[in-house]
Amino acid sequence: ELKVEQNPLFLSMQEGKNYTIYCNYSTTSDRLYWYRQDPGKSLESLFVLLSNGAVKQEGRLMASLDTKARLSTLHITAAVHDLSATYFCAVDDQDDKIIFGKGTRLHILP
Amino acid sequence: DTEVTQTPKHLVMGMTNKKSLKCEQHMGHRAMYWYKQKAKKPPELMFVYSYEKLSINESVPSRFSPECPNSSLLNLHLHALQPEDSALYLCASSRGILTEAFFGQGTRLTVV
């Protein structure tokens, strides 16, 4: 059974700082997704990572995938308050299901 | 149109009521999903429809009954729910199974 673990689960950081969220998964998978969720809102797709070594960047966020290590990272550069949200990684389990991590609640202090 | 639209946005229902949640997309996506999300928890998959046929039911109680009338619509019929069923219900769609999913805004359901 596929397990997806994120860490940290909660992160409070100052504006302007850099930080990384980690997503580990337990079995082989072809796809990894990163989503953002604001409180009381739906999920917004950020990145889809399809192959080993894939790196995608959008603004201050950069996601990468290492399928051999079964690890994805979401790196935040020079954080700004608007990035405060919960970030989920999700992995497909080869049985047509996408399994979500528990989420990382990111709080950026002005 | 790149949206997944869910109605209603909020719903309060009694334990003896029957209600339905609706989801619509016009992106030509052939896979549609229902997720349940409790506060501060990740979304939990309930049902997956692929080409209008139910392909995954994650052992969801029968008081939740999905329906896919056509490729653009997905319903979730609710009957005899329990207070613990209160949650945010999210609909999503994707081009196919296991491609990038786009989520609707959700229906916040409260069972009293």
Image (cartoon, rainbow, N blue to C red):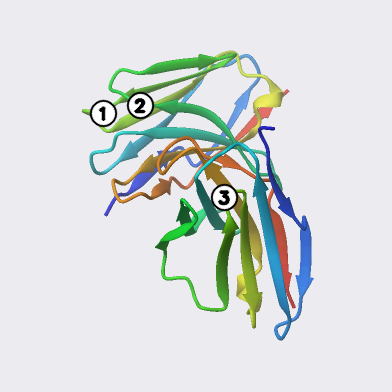
Q: Are marks 3 and 2 on the same chain?
A: no
Say what amino acid the circle numbered 2 marks.
Answer: Leu
- Vertical arrangement, residue A109 with respect to residue A101, above or below: above
Q: Out of B92 and B36, give the one closest to the viewer.
A: B92
Q: Position of residue B60 (x, y in %)?
A: 47, 71
Q: As shown in the figure, which amino acid type bears the numbered disc 3? A: Ser
Cα distance between the residues tagged 3 and 2: 26 Å
* Quadrant position of residue B22: bottom right
Of circles 1 and 3, the one toward us is: 3
Q: Quadrant of residue A7?
A: top left
> Can residue A45 be seen from the camera position used here?
yes
Q: Residues within 10 Å of mark 2 (few under 14, many from 20)?
A: some
Between circles 1 and 2, the one closer to the viewer is 2
Q: Circle 1 is placed at which residue position?
A: A67
Chain letter belonging to callout 1: A
Local SS, label 3: loop
Identify the residue at image location x=71%, y=51%.
B6
Q: Is residue B58 left or right of residue B93?
A: left
Residue plotted at (73% across, 69% down): B110
Graded by Cα atoms within 10 Å as few (under 14), some (14 to 19) or many (20 or more), the crowding at tag 1 reads: many
Residue A86 relative to residue B48: left or right: right
Where is mark 3, residue-wise?
B71
Nearer the camera: disc 3 or disc 2: 3
Q: Are tags 1 and 2 found on a single chain? A: yes
Identify the mark at residue A50; answer none if there is no mark.
2
Query: Which residue occupies 35% across, 26% down?
Result: A50
Q: CA distance from mark 1 to mark 3?
A: 34 Å
Which quarter of the image is occupied by the C terminus of chain B? bottom right
Q: Amino acid type of disc 1?
A: Thr
Q: Are marks 1 and 3 in contact (CB under 8 Å)?
A: no
